[in-house]
Amino acid sequence: MPLYAYRCTQCGHKFEKIQNFSADPETVCPKCGGVLERPLTAPRLNFKGAGWYINDYASKSSDSSSESASSETKSETKA
């Protein structure tokens, strides 16, 4: 269920409420009885766990890449 943000147009009271998609939006401020509006908010996304680009495919730290590059050059000079 999504979390909706509300703001009163009269007193400025802000609150959030978890509601179903099919539920009617709140229209009355619980503090002053004024008119509520639902301001647009950016969704929060946080990808956790393995399987995401940042975990599996992103370039690794410069230390590990420099070590692998130096080991490759050592093996080429020995051959």
Image (cartoon, helix red, strand yellow):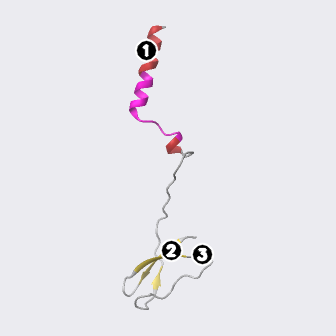
* Residue drawn at point x = 42 percent, y = 30 percent: 64
Q: Is residue 64 magenta?
A: yes
Numbered badge on residue 74 = 1
* Residue drawn at point x = 58 percent, y = 82 percent: 24
Q: The residue tagged with tag 1: helix, strand or loop?
A: helix
Q: Amino acid at mark 2?
A: Tyr
Q: The residue tagged with tag 3: helix, strand or loop?
A: loop
The N terminus sits in image quarter: bottom right
Q: The residue tagged with tag 2: helix, strand or loop?
A: strand
Q: Residue furthest top?
A: 79
Disc 2 crowd, CA 10 A, few/some/many (<14, 14-19, 20+): some
72 and 10: which one is in front?
72
Q: Position of residue 36 (x, y in %)?
A: 46, 84
Q: Position of residue 44 (x, y in %)?
A: 48, 62
Q: Amino acid at mark 3?
A: Asn
Circles 1, 3 touching at the beta carbon (< 8 Å): no
Determine whether 70 is above or below 18 in the image.
above
What whole-number distance in Å separates the C-alpha atoms at marks 2 and 3?
10 Å
* Residue drawn at point x = 44 percent, y = 92 percent: 33
Numbered badge on residue 4 = 2
Write down the region rendered in magenta: 56-69
Name the residue tied to disc 3: 20
Position of residue 22 in the picture relative to residue 40 (left or right)? right
Mark 2 or mark 3, which has the lower sequence index?
Answer: 2
Q: Position of residue 41 (x, y in %)?
A: 46, 69
What whole-number distance in Å separates the C-alpha atoms at marks 1 and 3?
62 Å
Mark 1 or mark 3, which has the lower sequence index?
Answer: 3
Numbered badge on residue 8 = none
Mark 1 or mark 2, which has the lower sequence index?
Answer: 2
Determine whether 61 is above or below 40 in the image.
above
